[in-house]
Image (cartoon, grey):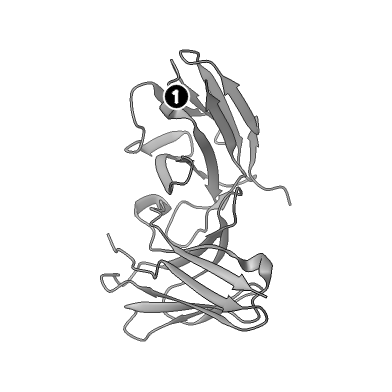
Amino acid sequence: DAKTTQPTSMDCAEGRAANLPCNHSTISGNEYVYWYRQIHSQGPQYIIHGLKNNETNEMASLIITEDRKSSTLILPHATLRDTAVYYCIVPRGGGKLIFGQGTELSVKP
Amino acid sequence: GAGVSQSPSNKVTEKGKDVELRCDPISGHTALYWYRQSLGQGLEFLIYFQGNSAPDKSGLPSDRFSAERTGGSVSTLTIQRTQQEDSAVYLCASSLGGDYNSPLHFGNGTRLTVT
């Protein structure tokens, strides 16, 4: 089962891009990388996922390196409401998610 | 459309009582997951259903915890003889296929307080 490593915390200025890194060096060929976030006292929110190509949706972009050993979640114009804990996860069998500590992102005015 | 719905949103119970927590997944989602999150802690996986079967119960902390799912839809998590350490937010999630390419969608949880 692929493990992920993320920085414990990051700061970002409001209106700037937030770039959140994740290492998943043991990921295998058919495993996806997922990003979720949890805003205080709410359930986790799905953001984006990808296999090998870069992905973009209305919330964020996901950049996956060619060797698939790391990825970066990009929030293009961070707002105060993006302050949350961000989780990078490679699902287990049955799509099961094992949550680590994640990255606590603080967006500051 | 409607998301994952959990009820009650809050539950206070006395130590030793049984409680039932309910989850209504997104319509058409075949996979359903239960997690819990104690105060200031991370999310802990409890159990996973594919249809009405539970192929992975590895996270249930003790035999006081059980869950069932009927009709491939609603699920109930039951905690018998509650203890104070059971106090937590219990979260339910569902996904379309329960495979690597199906995102999980979470409800807002049931906050359980055991006094």
Crowding around mark 1 (Cα neighbors within 10 Å: few <14, some 14 to 19, many 20+) is some
Classify residue B99 by image quadrant: bottom left
Q: Nearer the viewer, residue A5 or A71?
A: A5
Residue A25 as seen in the image, left or right of residue B22: left
Q: Give how far across and how far down residue B110 sits, in percent.
A: 59, 35
Q: Image height check: is B90 above or below B19?
A: below
Residue that sits furthest to the right in the current view: B1
Q: Is residue B74 visible?
A: no
The amino acid at mark 1 is Gln
Q: Is residue B41 visible?
A: yes
Q: Mark 1: which secondary structure? A: helix
- Residue drawn where x is 46% and y is 51% of the image: B98
Q: Which residue is mark 1?
A: B84
Query: How many numbered circles are shown?
Result: 1
Callout 1: chain: B
Q: Nearer the viewer, residue A54 or A16?
A: A16
Residue B12 as seen in the image, left or right of residue B65: right
Q: Nearer the viewer, residue B35 or A91?
A: B35
Q: Image height check: is A51 above or below A95?
A: below
Q: Give how far across and how far down residue A59 sits, in percent.
A: 64, 72
Q: Give how far across and how far down residue B83 sits, in percent.
A: 42, 21
- Residue drawn where x is 34% and y is 66% of the image: A4
Residue A5 as seen in the image, left or right of residue A13: left
- Residue drawn where x is 58% and y is 34% of the image: B111
